[in-house]
C-alpha cells in the first residue's frame, strides 16, 4: 500500500476519530492551547501597543523586542523553557505567548501611530479627548494592521503548538511525534495534513473576520490613500516588514 | 543539569562546528534558490494582475502551513535528505518575497520609467538597470526578514533527524541537559545577526545611492 492509500485508510478508520487520542480530542487540545495563548498574548500586546502607538513613544522598545524575538529559534526557546522550568503545560504555553506578543505588539503600534495625522487633528479639532481619539479614531483606522498582527501571531502559535508536542504537549502535533517515534509515516502525514488544514482554516477565518470588523470607510479611504506608486513607505510597507516577524519555525 | 558546562563545549567543538556548517547550508541554499524563483515570478506578478492574485493566495496559504507539517509532507517524496528541508524553506521565503518584489516594482515612480524610456531604454534593459535597482531596497528588506526566519526554522528539521543546530536542542531535551540548548540558541541567534549584517552590507554595496537609508 502506498503512503497515500495508508493516509486515506487512516482518515477513514473510525478508531482514529474517537477516544483520548482521536482527532476531535487532539484538535480540541490544539485549539485550546492556541486560543489560550492568543488571548493572553492579546491582553498583553494590544493595550501596550495601542497606548504606545497613540502616544508615539517607545519605538526602540517595541521594534527592539520584535527583532530580538524574531531571531530566537522557536524550537530552541521551547526546549529551553521545558528543561529550565520543568514539564507540564505551563512552559510550552509561556513559549507560545512569548512568540505571539511581538507580531501583535508591533502591528498595533505601527497601525496606531501610522494613522494619518490630518485625521487625528480633525478629530481633536471637533473636540474629541485624547482617549476618544485613541478608541474612536485610531483603533478603527488601524484595524486591518492590528488584525494582520493577530493573524501572524495565530499562524506562529498554531505552528509552535504543533512542535510543542515534542516536549509533551497534546494537540495535533502528537500524531507527528508519536508517528515519528513509532516509524508510522501514515500517522505522521495524517497529523501534518490536519495541522495544515487547521492553520489554513484559522488564517482564512481571520481574513474574513478582518473584513467584517473593518469599518467600510477605512477600507475605501485607505484604498485611495495608499496607491502603491505614490506612497512608497506608508502602512503597506510596515505591514510587509512586520508580517515577517512570524515565520520563526 | 542546569549549570552551563564549558567542558562539554570544549569536548564537542568539532561536532558543534559541523552542525553549524550544516545549519548554514540549510539556511543559505533555500534563501538563494528562493531569490532565483521570486524575482522572475515577482516581475511577472507586477506586470500581470491576474497572475498576482492567485499567486498571492497560494503564498498566503503556504505561509500559514506550519513548517513541521511541510517538512513531514516532503518525507514520502524525498526521504531524509537535505531536499526535505530545502524545498519547504524555499517555499516560505518565496511566499514572503513575492509581495516585496511586487511592492518594490510598483514603487518605481512613473516619471522615472518615462525618463528611462525617453532615453531609449528597451523594456528588458529598463527592467534590469532601472526598475530592479530601484526596487532592490524593498526586496532586500523582505529578504532580510525571510533569512532570519529561515535560520530559525532550519532547527525544526532536526526533529526529523536532519543534522543542524537544532540537533543540539534534541540532544539537550533527551538528556535533560541545558548546555547544548543554550549553545544552540546562541549560535542560531549569532548566525541570524551576522547574516542580517551581511545582507545590509550587500545592500549598501548594491545600492550606493541610498547611503544610510538601509535600516
Image (cartoon, rainbow, N blue to C red):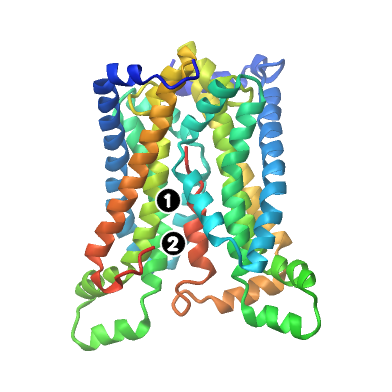
Q: Is residue B187 left or right of residue A92?
A: left
Q: Residue at x 53, y 29 (%)?
A: A78
Question: Label 1, on which residue?
Answer: B95
Q: Can residue B45 be seen here?
A: no
Name which quarter of the figure residue B45 lies in: bottom left
Q: Which residue occupies the foreground of this view, B192 or B143? A: B192
The picture places residue B65, in percent across and down from the top left corner, at 51, 40
Q: Chain of mark 2?
A: B
Q: Chain of mark 1?
A: B
Disc 1 crowd, CA 10 A, few/some/many (<14, 14-19, 20+)? many
Q: Is residue B131 above or below residue A2?
A: below
Q: Is residue B166 above or below residue B47?
A: above
Q: Residue furthest top?
A: A182
User: For the residues marked 1 and 2, what is the alpha-carbon distance in whole angstroms?
Assistant: 12 Å
Q: Which mark is residue B52?
A: 2
Secondary structure at badge 1 equals: helix
The picture places residue B46, in percent across and down from the top left corner, at 38, 67
Quarter holding the C terminus of chain B is bottom left
Name which quarter of the figure residue B161 lies in: top left
Q: Is residue A50 left or right of residue B183?
A: right
Q: Which mark is residue A131?
A: none
Q: Which residue occupies the foreground of this view, A144 or B188? A: B188
The picture places residue B176, in percent across and down from the top left corner, at 49, 15
Amino acid at each position: 500500500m502506498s503512503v497515500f492509500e495508508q493516509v486515506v485508510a487512516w482518515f477513514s478508520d473510525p478508531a482514529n476519530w474517537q477516544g483520548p487520542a482521536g482527532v476531535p480530542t487532539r484538535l480540541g487540545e490544539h485549539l485550546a492551547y492556541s486560543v489560550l495563548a492568543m488571548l493572553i498574548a492579546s491582553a498583553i500586546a494590544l493595550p501596550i501597543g495601542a497606548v504606545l502607538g497613540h502616544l508615539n513613544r517607545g519605538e526602540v522598545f517595541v521594534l527592539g523586542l520584535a527583532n530580538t524575538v524574531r531571531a530566537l529559534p522557536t524550537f530552541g526557546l521551547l526546549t529551553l523553557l521545558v528543561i529550565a522550568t520543568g514539564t507540564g503545560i505551563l512552559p510550552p504555553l509561556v513559549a507560545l505567548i512569548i512568540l505571539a506578543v511581538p507580531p501583535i505588539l508591533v502591528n498595533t503600534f505601527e497601525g496606531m501611530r501610522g494613522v494619518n495625522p490630518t485625521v487625528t487633528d480633525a478629530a481633536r479639532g471637533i473636540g474629541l479627548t485624547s482617549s476618544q481619539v485613541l478608541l474612536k479614531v485610531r483603533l478603527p483606522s488601524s484595524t486591518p494592521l492590528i488584525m494582520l498582527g493577530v493573524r501572524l501571531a495565530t499562524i506562529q502559535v498554531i505552528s509552535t503548538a504543533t512542535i510543542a508536542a515534542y516536549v509533551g504537549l497534546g494537540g495535533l502535533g502528537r500524531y507527528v511525534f508519536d508517528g515519528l517515534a513509532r516509524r508510522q509515516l501514515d500517522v505522521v502525514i495524517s497529523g501534518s495534513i490536519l495541522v495544515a488544514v487547521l492553520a489554513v482554516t484559522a488564517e482564512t477565518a481571520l481574513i474574513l473576520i478582518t473584513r467584517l470588523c473593518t469599518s467600510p470607510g477605512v477600507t475605501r479611504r485607505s484604498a485611495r490613500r495608499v496607491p502603491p506608486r505614490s506612497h512608497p513607505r506608508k502602512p503597506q510597507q510596515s505591514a510587509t516588514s512586520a508580517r515577517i516577524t512570524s515565520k520563526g519555525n | 543539569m542546569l549549570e552551563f558546562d564549558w567542558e562539554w563545549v570544549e569536548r564537542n567543538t568539532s561536532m558543534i562546528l559541523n552542525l553549524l556548517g550544516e545549519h548554514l547550508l540549510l539556511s543559505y541554499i533555500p534563501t538563494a534558490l528562493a531569490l532565483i524563483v521570486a524575482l522572475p515570478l515577482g516581475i511577472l506578478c507586477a506586470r500581470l494582475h491576474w497572475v498576482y492574485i492567485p499567486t498571492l493566495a497560494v503564498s498566503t496559504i503556504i505561509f500559514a502551513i506550519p513548517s513541521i507539517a511541510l517538512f513531514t509532507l516532503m518525507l514520502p517524496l524525498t526521504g531524509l535528505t537535505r531536499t526535505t528541508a530545502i524545498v519547504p524553506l524555499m517555499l516560505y521565503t518565496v511566499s514572503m518575497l513575492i509581495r516585496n518584489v511586487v511592492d518594490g516594482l510598483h514603487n518605481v515612480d512613473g516619471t522615472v520609467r518615462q525618463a528611462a524610456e525617453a532615453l531609449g531604454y528597451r523594456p528588458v534593459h529598463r527592467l534590469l538597470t532601472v526598475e530592479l535597482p530601484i526596487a532592490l531596497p524593498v526586496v532586500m528588506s523582505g529578504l532580510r526578514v525571510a533569512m532570519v526566519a529561515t535560520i530559525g526554522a532550519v532547527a525544526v528539521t532536526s526533529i526529523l533527524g536532519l543534522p543542524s543546530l537544532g540537533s543540539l536542542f534534541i540532544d539537550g531535551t533527551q538528556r535533560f541537559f541545558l548546555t547544548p540548548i543554550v549553545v544552540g540558541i546562541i549560535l542560531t541567534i549569532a548566525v541570524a545577526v551576522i547574516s542580517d549584517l551581511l545582507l545590509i552590507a550587500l545592500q549598501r554595496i548594491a545600492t550606493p545611492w541610498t547611503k544610510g537609508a538601509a535600516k
